[in-house]
Amino acid sequence: MIKKASLHDLPQLSKLFDDYRVFYHKESDLKSAVQFLTDRITKGESEIFVHENEQKELTGFTQLYPLFSSTRMKRLWLLNDLYIKPEHRGKHISKELINSAKELARTTNAAGVMLETDKTNQVGNMLYLRTDFKLDKSHNYYFWTNT
């Protein structure tokens, strides 16, 4: 079952979020994960959807941040995080979470959902194409880091 995350989900969600960060080669920091997610939820700064199995275990999540398109004069959603516990992969949970993201875009009258993933993320790149995302080959993506 997919549901919107709440503060009640923080113990399990924070662990999932920490695992997600470790997957992307960041140091584990569960305490900061709890604070980060608490802030996003209480301040309404992101939308987080979780998959909960029949045993009430959270098996995956996606987090979306609001953006705006000046040329479209509409909201956009950035699908920033998508993670499924390794033992639950291959069960179509990621597709269910992506469908929740698309439904969020529909219900908020957003122009769409955008995301980025590493070129080497073969599973993710196939998943996004299979869920009707289009690879933008006409724009360059630039990033500036303040470090």
Image (tube, grey):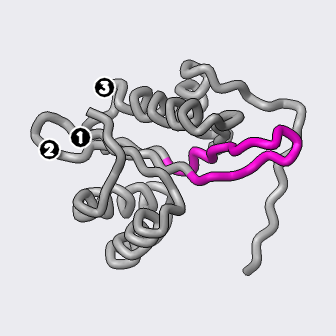
Work out how far the residue at label 1 is from the one at label 2, CA to CA, in angstroms.
Answer: 6 Å
CB under 8 Å between discs 1 and 2: yes
Q: Nearer the viewer, residue 87 or 47?
A: 47
Q: Nearer the viewer, residue 1 or 122?
A: 1
CB under 8 Å between discs 1 and 3: no
State which tag comes first along the sequence, 1 or 3.
Answer: 1
The residue that disc 1 covers is 52
The residue lying at 73 percent from left, 80 percent from top is 147
Check disc 1 and report its element: helix, strand or loop: strand
The residue lying at 10 percent from left, 40 percent from top is 55
State which tag comes first along the sequence, 3 or 2.
Answer: 2
- Label 1 packing within 10 angstroms: few (<14), some (14-19), many (20+): some
Q: Main secondary structure of the magenta part?
A: strand
The residue that disc 2 covers is 56
Q: Which residues are magenta?
A: 65-81
Residue 122 visible in the displayed image: no
State which mark lies toward you, 1 or 3.
Answer: 1
